[in-house]
Image: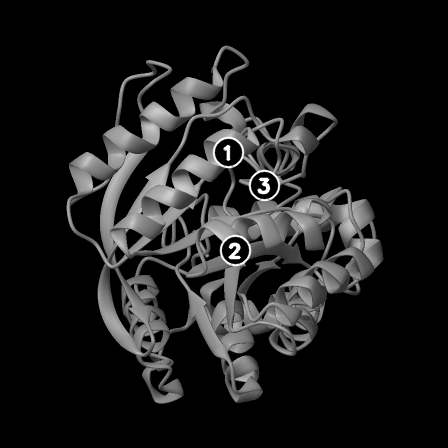
Amino acid sequence: MQRHTRSKAPDSPAAVWKEKESLLGKPVDAGVIILRTSGCSHFHGGGCSMCGYNTESSRGIAPGDVLKQFEHATAELGEVGMIKLYTSGSFLDACEVPEETAGSILKSCSDRGVRLLFESRPEYITPGRMDSVLGTHEDIEVAIGLESSNDRVLRYSINKGFTVGDFDAAAAVLNERSVDLRSYVLLKPPYLTEAEAVADAVSTVKHAAAVSSTVSLNPVNVQKGTVVERLWRNWAYRPPWLWSVLEVLRASASTGKRIVCDPTGGGKERGAHNCVGCDDVILHGIKAFSQSQDVSRLGAPECSCRELWRSLLDLEGFVEGGTCDLQRFFRKHRA
């Protein structure tokens, strides 16, 4: 099933599709459901600099609408081994998904015998709430967007609204209950050079891997209505190079944990990209690595843009006040 966007009716999910996912080392059909909710609470207070997912949210969504969205989506999906459920923010945020609604969704997944993956910010992952969730459905995986293990990056670059300590505390709650944690790591938040972004991502993957079953590397893509898009339009930001993605994945493959990456918008101007010539080959290798965990699949094709990337790593740290000019040059060369 290919992804398709539904109408904006309050009782219809934003999107539903099927994809392959690894479960206990075996490939299964996973149903992906994006629910339209009232939006991320953090977004209403400022939001993250790179996140535009709240375009699907609406303050007119009623609690009953969210449950109807889920029911319509599962009816369309049919039999799946796993459901990956996404909202604009946090499944465990009662302001976004009321506890009664969340409980009904959890019970539905339990009755179907399917694993449920959902996302949450760490402040909602408390002992009491997790005990309540597990009392309804035990086969769950929780995803947290750690993004960076550097508090300064979290605060000034991403405006994440929590600290590394908050993430560690939430991870401890999950680990104590043997709940699998999937941690998201951001590659190239705004205001970091390419080299700084690579180093920050490698460090963050290492931090996350210590408490996670899976680490997902997420290269920034330029989403509409975000701080990142404003910088991008002013030639002050370029999404990460695919060479940088390869660098982080290779450096992180020895953590002993499952590392996955599926660059949104990969190969396009708003997503992680190199040049037109080598993007597809590298993206294919990244997908193959994510499925197999075989680092040899991360091949590096011969391409002249690799030297351009290396030059950028060398130059960015020495250019004072000229970052916009550098970005203009590298974006005009489609690299």
Q: Can residue 244 be seen?
A: yes
Residue 186 at x, y percent in the picture: 60, 57
Quick one: label 2 or label 1, which is nearer the N terminus? 1
Tell me: residue 55, above or below residue 207. above
Query: Residue at (31%, 74%) from the top-left corner?
Result: 291
Apparent side of residue 74 relative to residue 213 in the rendered image (left or right): left
| Quadrant that contains the N terminus | top left
Q: Residue at horizontal 47%, vertical 74%?
A: 259
Residue at mark 1? 53
Where is residue 209? Give x, y as percent. 61, 76
As helix, strand or loop, the secondary structure at mark 2 comes to: helix
Q: Which residue is mark 2?
A: 134
Image position of 8 with respect to 4: above or below: above
**The quarter of the displayed image where residue 277 is located:** bottom left
Q: Residues within 10 Å of mark 2 (few under 14, many from 20)?
A: some
Identify which residue is drawn at 81% across, 54% down: 163
333, 177: nearer the viewer = 177
Front residue (pair 223, 57): 57
Circle 3: residue type? Leu
Q: Is residue 333 left or right of residue 287?
A: right
Q: Secondary structure at mark 1?
A: helix
